[in-house]
Image: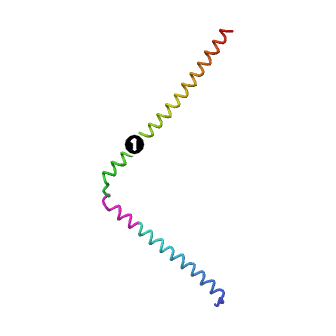
Amino acid sequence: MYYGKDDRLQQSKFQKNIRKIIDDSKRFNKKIDEFIRNTNRQQSLPPLRINKGDIRKMEEQERIKNAKRLRLKQDYEYLKAKKKYELDMHNIMEKIIEAKKKILL
């Protein structure tokens, strides 16, 4: 059975597309296999040695950061309390002035 020239071109384009998909899947499978192999290799190795000096530096930085955060929080609380105290004193002074005005009038 003869399909003609156009049918052969269509069929060859289709075969090329299928071949490309197969090649892509082979490449993908190779990458996956390589990733699995590397992961297994890394899991079988002993853990890396960590420099204790670096750990000390990191702990020191964390301690400094926590102290700074605490200091900022305390400063904020102090300013908030100071503002409330000033507002309360202002209200008390206003009440005293109003009471004096009532007594004098």
Q: Name which residue lies at 67% across and 11% down.
A: 102
**Tag 1's secondary structure?**
helix
Task: From the top left corner, tell me how far across and down residue 32 is, in percent.
Answer: 44, 68
Task: Determine crowd level at label 1: few under 14, some 14-19, many 20+ residues with C-alpha closer than 10 A.
Answer: few
Give whichever of 52, 95 is nearer the camera.
95
Protein image colouring: rainbow
Q: Name which residue lies at 30% across and 56% down.
A: 49
Q: Name which residue lies at 56% across and 78% down.
A: 18
* Main secondary-structure element of the magenta-colored stretch: helix
Residue 8 lies left or right of residue 79; in this view the side is right
Instruction: Quadrant for the N terminus, please.
Output: bottom right
Q: Residue 9's image quarter?
A: bottom right
- The residue where tag 1 is placed is 64
Residue 83 lies left or right of residue 71; in this view the side is right
Q: Amino acid at mark 1?
A: Ile
Give whichever of 39, 94 is nearer the camera.
94
Task: From the top left corner, tell me how far across and down residue 5 is, in percent.
Answer: 65, 89
Residue 61 lies left or right of residue 22; in this view the side is left
Instruction: Quadrant for the C terminus, please.
Output: top right
Vertical relation: 90 (above or below) 27 = above
Magenta residues (range): 36-47
Q: Residue 93's image quarter?
A: top right
